[in-house]
Image (tube, rainbow, N blue to C red):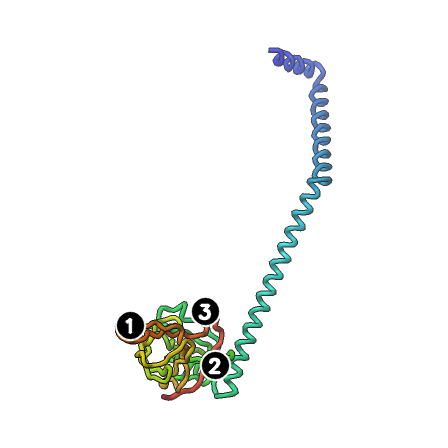
Amino acid sequence: MLTTLVFAAIILVDLLSGGVVRDSARALAANIWGIGARASAAVFHSGTFSSARALAEENRLLKSEVAELRARLAGIATVEEDARALRALAKLATEEDGVGAPIISSLFSSPYGTLLVGAGSDEGVEVGDLVLSGDDGRGSFVVGRVRDVGKHRALVDYALAPGTRFEGVIGGATLQIEGAGGRNARAEAPDSVLIESGDPVIVSEFGGRAVGIVGSISHDVANASNDIFINLPVDLGVLRYVYVIPFSP
């Protein structure tokens, strides 16, 4: 009730004064708002709030610089990997004629056990040619064989694709090798054959070249034999270049 009477009195005085009271109130409110704004600005542009804003901006700039440095380091690492891969191919090039080719798509993105390389008929690639990994010091391995050729591309069947079968020599014995997909294959050998982990798997069908090495051996007591697990010691997920050589069985 008292509040109502006070507001009524203010309105009455304002009417009698011709709006002077209302104008004064507005001026007072504007002055109070201005003081508040200046106070807020003073608080935010000095002391704790100013320091916090400066730190936030500095943190943003540092994060941006770190991201840029990481991108540069990744680029350098890629260049170094390419240089190593090309050196491995260059070593093969001194031993036999062929053509280096980048891998466009790998078997990991294909359900058919194939890969696509960036060299074709215009580069001298033909159906039946062998596709080798570079020699990084452990020797070169047969990755696959060219099935189809375009002008600048070739489709390659992976040597150890599921269902592939061929004869290979391990530990001096000729065994039947069966591809298991990825980088793997298996064979069975009698106990009398001395085979050790790391032995190369040599295939006459590929010109006496290796398609992998013995990874592990499991002894089958009941059949007096050994299950030989073979793998290609090349990471196909990161392999970027291959060497294609002419080959006629």
Q: Quadrant of the N terminus?
A: top right
- Foreground of the two, 217 or 140: 217
Q: Which is in the foreground here, disc 2 or disc 3? A: 2
Q: Give the number of the disc on residue 221.
A: 1
- Classify mark 2: residues with Cα within 10 Å, few (<14), some (14-19) or many (20+): few
Mark 2 / mark 1, whichever is N-terminal: 2
Mark 2 / mark 3, whichever is N-terminal: 2
Q: Report x, y in % for residue 66.
A: 62, 58
Q: In which image quadrant can residue 227 be found?
A: bottom left
Q: How far apart are marks 3 and 1 (CA)?
A: 36 Å
- Foreground of the two, 230 or 42: 230
Residue 41 falls left or right of residue 71: right
Dots 2 and 3: beta carbons under 8 Å? no
Q: Establish if 17 lies above or below 164.
A: above
Q: Residue at x 71, y 28 (%)?
A: 32
Dots 2 and 1: beta carbons under 8 Å? no
Q: Give the number of the disc on residue 237.
A: 3
Q: How far apart are marks 2 and 1 (CA)?
A: 34 Å
Considering every residue shown, the one lying at the far left of the view is 222
Element class at badge 1: loop
Residue topped by disc 2: 139
Mark 3 / mark 1, whichever is N-terminal: 1
Amino acid at dot 1: Val
Amino acid at dot 2: Gly
Q: Distance between the residues labelled 2 and 3?
A: 19 Å
